[in-house]
């Protein structure tokens, strides 16, 4: 087998790297401390916690959401899995602030862990992987959602897990091709491609189904991730020397993707188990209640389909104005963050005090997202780097569909909808930081390379320190610390847009 083919199909060495795991452990511990410390504060429900923790508690009692006003099933418009995850914390700690926020803090911490490992796989660098984990750890947006009992942190976690599984599937597919060539497979003589069971792709189907079982907006990622899988497989077959690499394995690619989506659908339906096994869930017997036939299994599925039709109509018709609504083009600019909590009660040692939890991304980090995306697009074209377009694909999947709905029907939207795209935005920043630290290929001398690396390392270190300082400055409004009113006011950099 030619060495050039071996290099084209090579992937990251999978040997255990203790230093990468040490850095991972340190950063995850810091992230966990920030997310769990004082998690039961403030007391009471904040923002949309009036919905999801109560739904979760009711699901523990009844198997489905309950409306105490009518003493019957509640009509809700989001799938059950996120609420079941909230219910896990409530099972351990009861119907308390710690109980209903515990699972979101776990999910937020796990996101940091998984992002570090994905970054290490993508960049082959402990430093860049650590920076990726630090940037997410020190992001106020992710911190607030990790400490609040909403659904968005769960969909962010499962989408990130799906992307990680797809990257591992790419490695697995290329390694199997390399092994086939080493064993004597000759693409010139054999018209069929080797059978490669994509275990990680199937895992991605499961995690993607879990994402959809939290919020339907996860579906936006389906065509983008499917395109990534096909492109990566075609590239692997081309690297292996297969003639007509697109047609040679496309049926197998599509077949495995269909199975992957089948698994996702199965996971999604399983998340509705509580609704299926009870008789009093909302629309559970819609057909029978309207005098239509309701055969076993099929009838339940038809009733669920009607439920989904009604929920879809609700989402598409949601145009009611809200104080904290925002448009997608405002999100990365922090144009309209969401106030989750506000109080002026308490003694802060000043005539007037203020305590707020503001869903605000760390400004230094978030205001670097758009430049990073522009640079990422440039590097993706100039370097023809699969990592660049993989990261860009996730970012576009998490952002672009919302622009469509904003223009199409003016739907009511909020900044927390960007949560699934956040890991990809951070990876875009890390990619650019890595490029800053990487000597240009044209440099000839070792001294020039060292100077270039030194300057790049100083610039990157300065950026990370600025993010950390910015996070520390805004930390009080991420966790609801009681401040003198003037101290709170000076943190509202964009004035009325942040109030």
Image: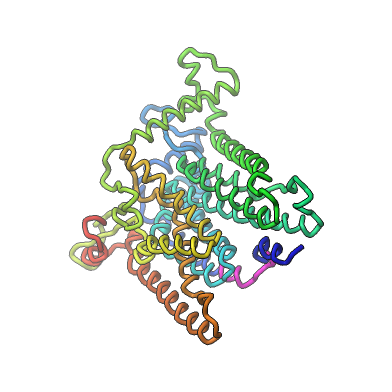
Asked if residue 312 lies left or right of residue 240, the reply is left
User: Is the N terminus in the top left, top right, bottom left or bottom right quadrant?
Assistant: bottom right
Q: Residue furthest left?
A: 351
Q: Residue furthest bottom?
A: 447
Q: Main secondary structure of the magenta part?
A: helix
Q: Position of residue 478 (x, y in %)?
A: 35, 60
Asked if residue 307 lies left or right of residue 340, the reply is right
Residue 8 or residue 469, whichever sits in front: 8
Residue 381 or residue 195, whichever sits in front: 381
Residue 482 included in the magenta stretch of the image = no
Q: Position of residue 225 (x, y in %)?
A: 54, 48
- Say if 148 sits above or below 264 in the image: below
- Say if 106 sits above or below 325 in the image: below
Give me the residue at 53% from left, 75% from top: 441
Give me the residue at 57% from left, 29% from top: 277
User: Would residue 341 be visible to someone looking at this image?
Assistant: no
The stretch in magenta equals 14-25
């Amino acid at each position: 087998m030619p060495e050039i083919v071996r290099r084209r199909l090579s992937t990251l060495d999978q040997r255990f790297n203790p230093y990468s795991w040490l850095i991972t452990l340190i950063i995850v511990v810091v992230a966990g401390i920030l997310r769990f410390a004082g998690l039961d504060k403030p007391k009471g429900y904040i923002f949309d916690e009036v919905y999801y923790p109560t739904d979760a508690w009711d699901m523990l009692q009844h198997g489905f959401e309950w409306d105490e006003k009518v003493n019957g099933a509640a009509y809700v418009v989001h799938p059950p899995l996120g609420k079941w995850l909230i219910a896990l914390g409530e099972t351990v700690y009861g119907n308390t602030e710690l109980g209903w926020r515990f699972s979101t803090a776990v999910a937020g911490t796990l996101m940091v862990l998984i992002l570090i490992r994905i970054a290490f796989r993508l960049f082959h660098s402990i430093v860049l992987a650590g920076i990726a984990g630090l940037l997410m750890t020190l992001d106020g947006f992710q911190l607030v959602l990790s400490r609040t009992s909403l659904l968005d942190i769960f969909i962010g976690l499962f989408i990130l897990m799906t992307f990680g599984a797809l990257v591992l599937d790419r490695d697995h597919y290329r390694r199997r091709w390399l092994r086939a060539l080493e064993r004597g497979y000759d693409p010139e003589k054999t018209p069929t491609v080797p059978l490669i069971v994509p275990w990680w792709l199937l895992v991605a189907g499961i995690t993607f189904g879990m994402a959809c079982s939290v919020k339907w907006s996860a579906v936006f990622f389906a065509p983008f991730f499917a395109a990534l899988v096909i492109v990566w497989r075609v590239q692997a077959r081309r690297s292996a020397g297969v003639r007509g690499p697109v047609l040679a394995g496309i049926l197998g690619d599509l077949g495995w993707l269909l199975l992957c989506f089948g698994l996702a659908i199965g996971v999604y339906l399983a998340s509705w188990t509580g609704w299926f096994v009870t008789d009093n869930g909302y629309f559970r017997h819609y057909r029978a209640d309207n005098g239509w036939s309701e055969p076993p299994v099929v009838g339940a599925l038809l009733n669920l389909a009607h439920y989904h039709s009604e929920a879809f109509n609700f989402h598409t018709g949601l145009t009611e104005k809200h104080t904290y609504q925002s448009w997608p083009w405002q999100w990365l600019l922090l144009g309209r963050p969401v106030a989750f909590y506000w109080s002026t009660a308490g003694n802060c040692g000043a005539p007037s005090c203020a305590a707020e939890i503001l869903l605000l991304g760390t400004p230094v980090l978030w205001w670097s997202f758009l430049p990073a995306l522009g640079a990422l697009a440039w590097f993706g074209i100039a370097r023809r780097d699969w990592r660049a377009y993989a990261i860009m694909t996730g970012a576009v999947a998490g952002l672009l569909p919302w622009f469509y709905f904003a223009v199409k029907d003016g739907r009511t939207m909020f900044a927390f909808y960007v949560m699934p795209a956040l890991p990809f935005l951070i990876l875009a920043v890390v990619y650019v930081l890595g490029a800053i630290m990487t000597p240009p290929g044209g440099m000839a001398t070792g001294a020039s390379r060292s100077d270039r690396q030194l300057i790049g390392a100083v610039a990157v270190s300065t950026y990370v320190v600025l993010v950390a300082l910015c996070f520390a400055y805004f930390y009080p409004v991420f966790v609801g610390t009681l401040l003198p009113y003037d101290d709170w006011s000076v943190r509202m950099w964009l004035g009325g847009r942040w109030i």
